[in-house]
Image: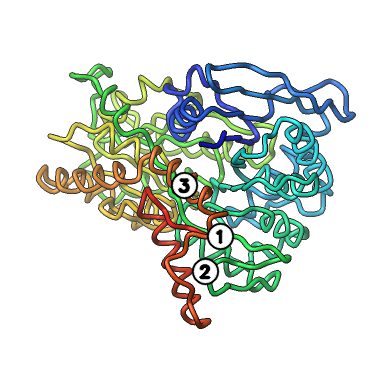
């Protein structure tokens, strides 16, 4: 079995991966099993604005090694804050209005990817399998190819892919497409994302679907498929308390757990809860909204704006509806320990997950896994979260429609135990089927198959090629043993 080499903007602490949840659990397990290397930024920012060294620092964790590099102050400002989070993040979440296209950050973004590629090249072995993660590192595969790397390289994008016309708004979209075309396999969260990327490659850079189902662009051939990220379900079930340990509340709790981000739909959520209290006054003093919103990217102006808006909204709603013994909204702007969060999930009647756009959203899956199966809560989920493609038994809402969300809150609170159990059972079965280990295993098996050209048959017509492409995508989504080219 070949060694696994991971590259991402940040690396996980492999000694604490089991507590981190999400993809870190599966990746750490895979690295321990097959051996490997994980390269990323160490989180440190140098004082100087010049370029930093390409020799990483190394830390051993049994059969795995973590290699890290620092960023200079200028690199952090232009590669990370600038291009990654002020251009790519808003565009990929369909927020063209706040993308800073004119700032000239792209060159530094490319330079940092080149520096990481130069640091990785001498560490590679001929049979290594390379897996690059997320939007910070789109050009990394291209830079490795320039250095003569011929190993199979896969790329996974954790955020959504925008429609083709939105992608085309990025001035450097052709350069980004050239970077994507350097990979052998691109993994995305949903079938919608797959369709959007194929549309963009066809319309934006004249890519075409080949007879074997791959996409040809910039004289390279690549596979694109959906691999939805999951959670370690059993870890949540094992950590569920045998009895309630959270402090009893005087009211029924609706729970939101979202990073403080303009993509999460938090103002719309607050307004929907306000509309619910206005529309259904019998629930006043009986229901609270607990919103945990830990800070993130506080140096980006848009995040300061959303924090100010939420503080104003929560104060206004509490002032309008609150009583001496009841505060409608608990707004918590700090992180919550994972163990405590599992308990809070379990003691919340409604999980309120309504992002305006989200690659997947693991909070929705964590909420379901943490529930008491005998008396579970109800998940309200945005149709624009990637998780909605799998979690159809949730109450699916339009996060832009305040009335829709207000009525969904009423439906969730009125739902009988039998229906709640049925919905929870189906949701739990779904997240078990596509857990974090299936995600990791299926992607790596597909990448291993890239060079083997594992096709069932060769199609003979363009229409058959299109059908085959969709078939390969669906196989990659539903099976832990993916057949891919």
| Whether residue 270 is visible | no
Query: Residue 351, image x and y in percent?
Result: 32, 40
Residue lying at 59% horizontally and 57% vertically, measured from the top left: 94
What secondary structure is marked by label 2?
loop
Helix, strand or loop for disc 3: helix
Q: Earlier in the sequence, mark 1 or mark 2?
A: 2
Q: Residue at position x 27%, y 32% from top? A: 348
Say which residue appears at 71% left-offset and 44% top-offset.
140
Mark yes or no: residue 95 visible: yes
Using the image as rendered, state which of residue 137 and residue 50 is in the foreground. 137
Residues at badges 1 and 2 in contact (C-beta under 8 Å)? yes
Residue, far right: 50
> Is 242 displayed left or right of 104 in the figure?
left
Disc on the earlier residue, 3 or 1? 1
Q: CA distance from mark 2 to mark 3?
A: 17 Å
Give the left or right position of residue 55, taking residue 281 as reference. right
Residue 223 — which label? 1
Q: Is residue 298 above or below residue 218?
A: above
The image quadrant that residue 224 belongs to is: bottom right
Tag 2 residue: 213
Task: Please give the label number shown on residue 445.
Answer: 3
Along the viewing direction, whichever of 319 and 17 lies nearer the viewer: 17
Q: Considering only order in the chain, which callout, 3 or 2, is on the residue closer to the N terminus?
A: 2
**Snapshot colouring:** rainbow
Q: Quadrant of residue 29?
A: top left
Q: Would you say 155 lies left or right of 334 here?
A: right
Residue 352's disc is: none
Q: Residues within 10 Å of mark 1 (few under 14, many from 20)?
A: many
Q: Residue at left 72%, top 21%?
A: 44
Tell me how far mark 1 sits from mark 2, CA to CA: 8 Å
Residue 181 vertical position relative to residue 135 in the rendered view, above or below: below
């Amino acid at each position: 079995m070949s060694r696994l080499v991971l590259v991402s903007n940040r690396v996980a602490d492999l000694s604490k991966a089991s507590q981190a949840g999400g993809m870190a659990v599966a990746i750490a397990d895979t690295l321990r099993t097959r051996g490997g290397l994980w390269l990323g930024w160490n989180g440190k920012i140098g004082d100087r604005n010049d370029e930093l060294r390409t020799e990483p620092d190394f830390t051993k964790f049994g059969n795995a090694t973590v290699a890290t590099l620092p960023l200079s102050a200028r690199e952090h400002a232009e590669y990370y804050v600038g291009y990654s989070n002020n251009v790519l993040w808003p565009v990929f979440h369909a927020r063209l209005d706040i993308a800073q296209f004119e700032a000239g950050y792209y060159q530094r973004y490319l330079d940092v990817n080149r520096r990481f590629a130069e640091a990785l090249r001498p560490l590679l072995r001929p049979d290594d399998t390379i897996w690059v993660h997320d939007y910070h590192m789109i050009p990394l595969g291209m830079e490795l190819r320039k250095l003569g790397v011929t190993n199979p390289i896969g790329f996974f994008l954790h955020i959504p892919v925008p429609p083709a016309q939105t992608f085309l708004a990025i001035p450097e979209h052709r350069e980004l497409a050239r970077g994507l075309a350097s990979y052998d396999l691109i993994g995305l969260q949903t079938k919608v994302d797959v369709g959007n990327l194929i549309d963009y490659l066809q319309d934006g850079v004249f890519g075409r679907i080949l007879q074997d189902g791959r996409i040809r662009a910039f004289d390279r051939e690549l596979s694109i498929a959906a691999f939805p990220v999951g959670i370690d379900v059993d870890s949540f079930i094992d950590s569920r308390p045998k009895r309630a340990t959270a402090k009893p509340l005087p009211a029924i709790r609706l729970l939101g757990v979202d990073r403080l981000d303009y993509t999460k739909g938090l103002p719309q959520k607050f307004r929907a809860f306000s509309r619910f209290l206005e529309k259904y006054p019998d629930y006043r003093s009986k229901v609270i909204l607990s919103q945990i919103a830990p800070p993130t990217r506080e140096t980006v102006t848009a995040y300061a704006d959303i924090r100010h808006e939420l503080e104003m909204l929560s104060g206004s709603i509490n002032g309008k509806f609150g009583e001496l013994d009841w505060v409608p909204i608990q707004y918590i702007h700090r992180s919550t320990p994972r163990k405590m969060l599992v308990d809070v999930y379990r003691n919340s009647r409604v999980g309120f997950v309504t992002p305006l756009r989200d690659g997947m959203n693991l909070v929705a899956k964590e909420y379901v896994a943490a529930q008491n199966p005998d008396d579970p809560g109800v998940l309200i989920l945005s149709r624009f979260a990637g998780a909605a493609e799998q979690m159809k038994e949730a109450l699916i809402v339009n996060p832009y429609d305040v009335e829709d969300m207000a009525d969904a809150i009423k439906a969730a609170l009125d739902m009988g135990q039998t229906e709640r159990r049925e919905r929870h059972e189906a949701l739990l079965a779904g997240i078990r089927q596509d857990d974090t280990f299936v995600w990791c295993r299926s992607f790596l098996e597909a990448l291993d198959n890239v060079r083997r050209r594992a096709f069932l048959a060769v199609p003979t017509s363009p229409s058959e090629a299109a059908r085959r492409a969709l078939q390969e995508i669906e196989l990659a989504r539903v099976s832990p043993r993916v057949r891919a080219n």
